[in-house]
Image (tube, rainbow, N blue to C red):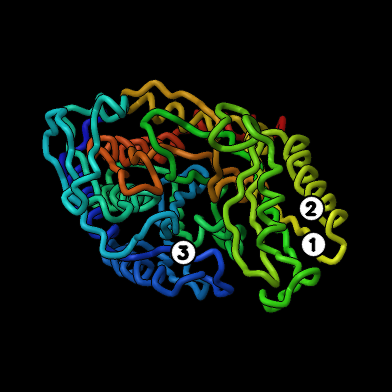
Amino acid sequence: MPDLPSELQDDVLERLLRYVRIDTTSDQDSETYPSTAKQRDLGELLERELRELGLNDVELTEHGYVFATLPGAGGPTVGLIAHMDTSEDESGANVKPQVLRNWDGTDIKLPGDPGKVLRAEENPILAERVGHDIVTTDGTTLLGADDKAGVAEIMGAVAYLAAHPEIEHAPIRVGFTVDEEVGRGVDHFDIEAFGADFAYTLDGAEVGRIDDETFSASEVRIRIEGLSVHPGTSKGKMVNAIKLGARLIERLPRGERSPETTEGREGFIHPSRFTGGTAEAELRFIARDFDAGKLEEHEQLLRKLAEDLAAEEPRARVTVSVEEQYRNMKEFLDRDASVTEAADEAARRCGLEPWREPIRGGTDGSMLSARGLLTPNIYTGGQQFHSVLEWASVQDMALSAATIVELVKLWAEPEWATRRRSASATA
């Protein structure tokens, strides 16, 4: 790790503990933007803190984004992005984090729920963190390290650089987004106004992992309109939308194409929500794959199942809608490899050996890369996201913040500016 003062480690921890106590859960059913007003509570805090650090152009936008600028010595303008919202999978309200200093490797009991325990033998990554300071939940909520660890690391890095003007670095644009967890994180993100030449999301997990490939993703909604009749007099008349929906789900492939049966580069179809009643019901699926052609096959399978159902029960009306959520960012990042290679080099300067593995998910960088702002993803040190067993290593978080510092220092070096010009010329 580079020779950074302990204040950086202390700062990212203090910030994480402060930020996770603010409930920023997003809502996929909301029609507002951001989807929940409480996301602005964290945005307002970050806006104040950025102003106190002396950054320029600090803004909390009408859509809930927070932007700021830290001027630099030269080189391209580097964007640093993290999202403020947390997943609906577990509660993000009344988060009570605990910090285990110099963890000794014994079972970590979560005080809010005696049945929830983090055990080293069940978690190889945790087992390697003996001696680290470990942050967990109390077992009743998620922690929110996804992505408040990333927020804390960006804030810690720019605070350090602002306090040390003697360190030469590239100009920085900070961007904190909303609604990433519901797939709408950059719906109103103005890339031109943001003004970065490229960017990095701080939204990864294990230190050393630089992400340049994600799933391509779609949401498929199947709506079933049946006919509700009083159950006492419904013989030959009722068309039960719930039963029809259950029939469709029962016909999904078994042993393949599901999250619980796939890994690595295998895609899947995942029924994520089933709502409604006798008269009408809606099934929501997420379809994921690294290959665009295979993703289309997943979509077509759902269309075929819906068509078969409608043919079997012509009294029902079955409709299908498909919405693109994001696309694999690798095809865009490969056009200028220097952006990802710089993240690799920054990791090496922090004593890490960078590595790659496709993300079985997505980031704001997926859509931003597709829209022209190349945005690979960097580790944060958080683990077991979207879970009451979520945890983070403070030392890993400090490594992430140190990587940011090394990254923006690197981009102020003439060699890297030249490398990027060469890559852009041949793209």
What label does residue 26 carry, if any? Answer: 3
Neighbours of disc 2 within 10 Å: few (<14), some (14-19), many (20+): many
Q: Amino acid at mark 3?
A: Ser
Q: Is residue 74 above or below residue 223?
A: above
**In the rendered image of this protein, does residue 57 appear above or below residue 167?**
below
Residue in the picture at 74% in, 55% down: 322
Could you say which disc has been placed on residue 319 in the image? Answer: 1
> What is the x, y in percent for residue 6?
15, 40
Choose the circle earlier in sequence order: 3 or 2. 3
Q: Name the kind of residue labelled 1 in the image.
A: Thr
Q: Quadrant of residue 241?
A: bottom right
Residue 418 showing in the rendered view: no
Which residue corresponds to mark 2?
A: 306
**Comes first in the chain, label 1 or label 3:** 3
Tell whether label 2 touches label 3 (CB within 8 Å).
no
Q: Residue at x 78, y 47 (%)?
A: 305
